[in-house]
């Protein structure tokens, strides 16, 4: 992807947290391995592109979103936005232009909304703090058009309401309107529909898809749900224990998954999902273990039903399966 077409690029991105260890580790002052929440991932997002990052909890997918939105600093690697290295940009003033262009939508809309503010105040907040409106009329126009774009129509009916007067779906639309009001180039949406009823989910996904079409806004969509990823994304990256183990177009990951983890993840989804084909791969059980417990080898090997000796000793490299499809597994190497 050329620089002009790429809005965001992660290069060898790492987020390592200090390990806490147990009581005996502290008594005997034993060294404790760092938790490698994100461990060297490369990812690009094109302008107007929707990329889904899929994985179980503990895979590091939300940490990637928090690095991109500058809520946490990476411990290694680079973050480029619109061709510029923004890895070390920090502080409210320095980050103001970045916050204008990159917004985040959280999973729990109720937590994200100030219960004492009206819908107008909530949606206007970002525009005010970034000083994007020159006068009150422009602010009112931005708030109304954002509410309309998020599917809250007519906007006047919602401006003076408080969060507790809204349904779950309406609250998530208010969060989306708040992000849209600053007219960003990229939205990072962290499990934005996982707390909503199925019927409302489809509507919110449609709002996000329409926004991309109308404004060429890019979207990084973080989810544990492979069918949801398939329904909205152009490309899907599958994460396991801090690494991208498979990446491809939504169709490649859905109809032709190659990594044993992606196959197992597909198997764990409802039967209606078209990727439920990996009969040789049993469904996943148990949770993602701590990355600190698997210092060498493929990180998936303790749960992988087709692991070979080499998997316990060496990390597999990414193998190109097509120009758009990569997977990191020893069984795919020639
Ligand atoms: Fe399984 Fe080995 Fe492939 Fe890892 S490298 S997914 S353990 S077969």
Image (tube, rainbow, N blue to C red):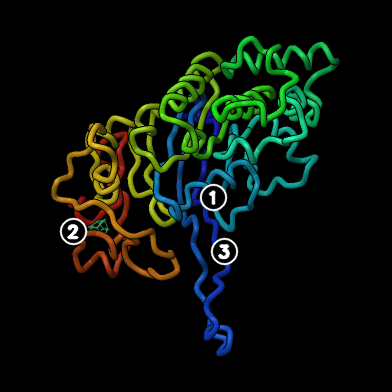
- Which residue is painted at 26% across and 36% down in the image? 322
* In the foreground, 60 or 248: 60
Circle 3 crowding by C-alpha within 10 Å: few under 14, some 14–19, many from 20:
some
* In the foreground, 227 or 10: 227
Q: Which mark is residue 63?
A: 1
Q: Quadrant of residue 102?
A: top right
Q: Quadrant of residue 256?
A: top left
Dot placed on the residue nearer the N-terminal end, 1 or 2: 1
Q: Is residue 314 left or right of residue 43?
A: left
Report the Cα–Cα distance between label 3 and label 1. Answer: 11 Å
Circle 1 crowding by C-alpha within 10 Å: few under 14, some 14–19, many from 20:
many
Q: Which mark is residue 165?
A: none
Residue bearing the label numbered 3: 17
Dot placed on the residue nearer the N-terminal end, 3 or 1: 3
Q: Is residue 101 left or right of residue 93?
A: left
Q: Secondary structure at mark 2?
A: loop
- Which residue is painted at 77% across and 34% down in the image? 116
The x and y percentages for residue 283 are 24, 51
- Which residue is painted at 56% across and 73% down in the image? 20
Q: Secondary structure at mark 1?
A: helix
- Which residue is painted at 63% across and 51% down in the image? 72
Residue bearing the label numbered 2: 306
Decide: is 156 above or below 11: above
The x and y percentages for residue 308 are 19, 64
* In the foreground, 268 or 130: 268
Q: Is residue 236 left or right of residue 214?
A: left
């Amino acid at each position: 992807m050329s620089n002009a077409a790429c809005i965001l690029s992660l290069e060898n991105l790492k987020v390592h947290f200090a390990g806490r260890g147990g009581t005996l580790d502290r008594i005997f002052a034993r060294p404790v391995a760092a938790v490698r929440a994100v461990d060297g991932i490369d990812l690009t997002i094109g302008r107007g592109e929707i990329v889904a990052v899929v994985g179980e909890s503990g895979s590091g997918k939300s940490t990637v979103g928090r690095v991109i939105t500058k809520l946490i600093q990476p411990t290694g690697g680079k973050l480029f936005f619109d061709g510029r290295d923004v890895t070390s940009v920090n502080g409210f003033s320095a980050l103001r232009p970045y916050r204008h262009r990159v917004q985040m939508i959280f999973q729990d809309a109720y937590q994200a909304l100030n219960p004492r503010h009206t819908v107008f105040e909530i949606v206007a907040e970002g525009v005010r703090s970034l000083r994007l409106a020159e006068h009150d009329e422009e602010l009112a126009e931005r708030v109304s058009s954002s509410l309309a774009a998020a599917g809250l129509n007519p906007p006047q009916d919602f401006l003076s309401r408080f969060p507790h007067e809204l349904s779950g779906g309406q609250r998530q639309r208010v969060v989306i309107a708040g992000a849209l009001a600053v007219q960003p180039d990229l939205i990072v949406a962290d499990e934005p529909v996982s707390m909503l009823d199925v019927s409302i989910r489809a509507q919110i996904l449609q709002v996000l898809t329409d926004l991309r079409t109308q404004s060429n806004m890019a979207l990084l969509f973080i989810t544990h749900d492979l069918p949801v990823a398939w329904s909205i994304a152009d490309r899907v990256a599958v994460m396991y224990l801090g690494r991208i183990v498979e990446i491809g177009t939504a169709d490649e990951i859905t109809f032709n998954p190659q990594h044993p983890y992606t196959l197992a993840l597909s198997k764990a989804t409802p039967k209606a999902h078209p990727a439920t084909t990996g009969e040789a791969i049993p469904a996943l059980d148990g949770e993602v273990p701590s990355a600190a417990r698997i210092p060498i080898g493929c990180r998936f090997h303790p749960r992988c039903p087709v692991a070979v000796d080499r998997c316990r000793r060496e990390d597999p490299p990414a193998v190109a399966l097509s120009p758009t499809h990569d997977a990191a597994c020893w069984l795919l190497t020639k």
